[in-house]
C-alpha cells in the first residue's frame, strides 16, 4: 500500500481547464473521497492517477515514485468504475482471474487470491456464473473482487455505487467502509453524493470547476466550511444564507438584516474587529433553527416566523419558514407539528452560525 501525492497538477483539454493546480497528499491506508458537482474534474483527476489520462502539468507520485510517465498497467493501482465493465462471456471466476493471468501470476496464486477475495465479498457461490446471471449489487462485488485480487498499492473508485438502487447503495457503502478496514488499503473514492462523502471518507476533497475548494475531515467540512460553495454543497437541506451587516454597538457585534438582529457570540466577536460595518453573509444550518426548546435554547435569540410548508419525513420534519423578508428552512424533531400559516417563535442557535465574505465567498474570520 502507498501514499499518493499530487503536486501542482493541471489537466487541460484544449480550452477546458478540467483540473487546476491540484495539490493533494493522500496518506497510506487513507480513505479519501473526492466530491463535487458534475464536470468539476473528479474523474479526470482519478484517470490521471490511474494513468488513463496524461498530466498536462505537475507531478503525481505513488509512494516515492514519480509516475507521470509510467504506463497505466505498471502503476499498481486498481480502478473500479461506475459501469462495472465485466466481460460478459467469462464467468465470475474468469473475470477475477483475467488481470492476474495477463500479468502471468502462477495458477495456484490466482486460485488462492480469488478464493480469499470471494470469501471477503460473499460471492463464493457465484464464481461459476456469468455476469448476466447476477444482480447489480452482485456485479458490483465482482468488479470489486477483480480489483482486490490484484492487491494494488491503491484502489481508485469512480462512482462505483451510482448504478445501484438506494437501499443497496447504503448497504454497499458500509460494506466498502468495512472492506477498507479489512484491507487497510489506500482508497480514493469519487462521488457527487455528499452523503457518501460524509459517511465514508477519512477526509474529503470538495471540488468545483477544476479547483479544490477545501480538504478536511467530514467534521471540518461540515462545521467549518471554507467558503459558501462548500457550505451550500454539504448538508441537506442546504444551509440558509442571510445577507447581513455587521454592526458594533457598545462593544457587542450584531448581525443586522431587515428582519433580524442577532448578537454575535463572544467567542467569535474577538476575531471580527476588522469587519465592523461590513456586509457579511450569515449561514445557519437547518438543524440550528429550533421550533421547540432544546438544551441551551433559553439563551438563543427568538425570531417570529410564519410556517409555509411542513414536510414530515418520519424521523425528522423539514419546515419552510418565512420571516416576512425571506424563506428559511428548519430541520426539527417530528414532535414539532405546526400547521402552514402558524406564526411561531423560532430559536436560532447563534453558537453554530457561519459567516462568509459576500465578495470573496470565504469563511470569516479569515
Ligand atoms: N476527453 C475530454 N475532452 C474534452 N473535455 C473533457 C474530456 N474529459 C473531460 N472533459 C471535461 O473536463 C471537465 C471535467 O470532467 P470530469 O469528467 O473530470 O468531471 P466529473 O467531476 O467526473 O463529473 P461527473 O460527476 O459528471 O462525472 C468537464 O468540463 C468535461 O467536459
Ligand atoms: Mg465523473
Image (cartoon, rainbow, N blue to C red):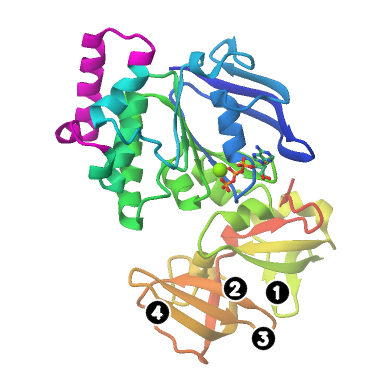
The mark closer to the camera, 4 or 2, is: 4
**Is residue 109 a member of the stretch shown in magenta?**
yes
SS state under label 2: loop
Please give the residue where the numbered disc 3 appears in the rendered image. Answer: 324
Which of the numbered marks, if any, corresponds to residue 336? 4
Q: Residues within 10 Å of mark 3 (few under 14, many from 20)?
A: few
Separation (CA) of disc 3 from disc 1: 14 Å
Separation (CA) of disc 3 from disc 4: 21 Å
Q: Earlier in the sequence, mark 1 or mark 4?
A: 1
Q: Is residue 106 above or below residue 20?
A: above
Region in magenta? 101-130
**Is residue 231 visible from the viewing direction of this image?**
yes
- Location of residue 321 in the rendering, given as x and y in whole percent from the top left corner: 56, 80
Residue shown at the point (60%, 48%) measured from the top left: 224
Q: Where, by quadrant of the figure, is residue 263 drawn?
A: bottom right
Q: Earlier in the sequence, mark 3 or mark 1?
A: 1
Q: Earlier in the sequence, mark 3 or mark 2?
A: 2
Q: Quadrant of ligand 2?
A: top right
Which of the numbered marks, if any, corresponds to residue 301? 2
Please name whichever residue, 204 or 264, is drawn nearer the observer in this view of the structure. 204
Q: Are marks 3 and 4 in contact (CB under 8 Å)?
A: no
Residue shown at the point (43%, 69%) measured from the top left: 294
Q: Residues within 10 Å of mark 1 (few under 14, many from 20)?
A: some
Amino acid at each position: 500500500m502507498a501514499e499518493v501525492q499530487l503536486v501542482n497538477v493541471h489537466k487541460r483539454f484544449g480550452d477546458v481547464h478540467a483540473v487546476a493546480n491540484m495539490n493533494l497528499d493522500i496518506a497510506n491506508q487513507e480513505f479519501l473521497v473526492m466530491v463535487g458537482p458534475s464536470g468539476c474534474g473528479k474523474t479526470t483527476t482519478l484517470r490521471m492517477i490511474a494513468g488513463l489520462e496524461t498530466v498536462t502539468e505537475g507531478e503525481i507520485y505513488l509512494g516515492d515514485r514519480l509516475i507521470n510517465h509510467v504506463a497505466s498497467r505498471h502503476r499498481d493501482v486498481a480502478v473500479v468504475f461506475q459501469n462495472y465493465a465485466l466481460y460478459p462471456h467469462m464467468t465470475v471466476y474468469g473475470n477475477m482471474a483475467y488481470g492476474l493471468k495477463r500479468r502471468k501470476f502462477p495458477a495456484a496464486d490466482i486460485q488462492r487470491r480469488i478464493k480469499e477475495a470471494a470469501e471477503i465479498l460473499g460471492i463464493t457461490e457465484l464464481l461459476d456464473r456469468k455476469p448476466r446471471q447476477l444482480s447489480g449489487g452482485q456485479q458490483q462485488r465482482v468488479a470489486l473482487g477483480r480489483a482486490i485480487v490484484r492487491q494494488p498499492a491503491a484502489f481508485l473508485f469512480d462512482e462505483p455505487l451510482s448504478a445501484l438502487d438506494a437501499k443497496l447503495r447504503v448497504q454497499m457503502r458500509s460494506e466498502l467502509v468495512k472492506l477498507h478496514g479489512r484491507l487497510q488499503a489506500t482508497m480514493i473514492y469519487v462521488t457527487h453524493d455528499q452523503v457518501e462523502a460524509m459517511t465514508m471518507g477519512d477526509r474529503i476533497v470538495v471540488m468545483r470547476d477544476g479547483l479544490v475548494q477545501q480538504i478536511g475531515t467530514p467534521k471540518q467540512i461540515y462545521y467549518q466550511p471554507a467558503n459558501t460553495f462548500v457550505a451550500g454543497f454539504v448538508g441537506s437541506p442546504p444551509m440558509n444564507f442571510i445577507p447581513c451587516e455587521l454592526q458594533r454597538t457598545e462593544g457587542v457585534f450584531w448581525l443586522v438584516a431587515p428582519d433580524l438582529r442577532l448578537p454575535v457570540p463572544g467567542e467569535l466577536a474577538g476575531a471580527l474587529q476588522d469587519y465592523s460595518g461590513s456586509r457579511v453573509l450569515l449561514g445557519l444550518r437547518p438543524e440550528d433553527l429550533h421550533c421547540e426548546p432544546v438544551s441551551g435554547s433559553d439563551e438563543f435569540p427568538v425570531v417570529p416566523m410564519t410556517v409555509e410548508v411542513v414536510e414530515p419525513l418520519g424521523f425528522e420534519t423539514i419546515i419552510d419558514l418565512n420571516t416576512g423578508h425571506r424563506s428559511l428552512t428548519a430541520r426539527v424533531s417530528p414532535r414539532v407539528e405546526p400547521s402552514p400559516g402558524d406564526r411561531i417563535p423560532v430559536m436560532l442557535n447563534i453558537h453554530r452560525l457561519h459567516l462568509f465574505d459576500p465578495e470573496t465567498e470565504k469563511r470569516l474570520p479569515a
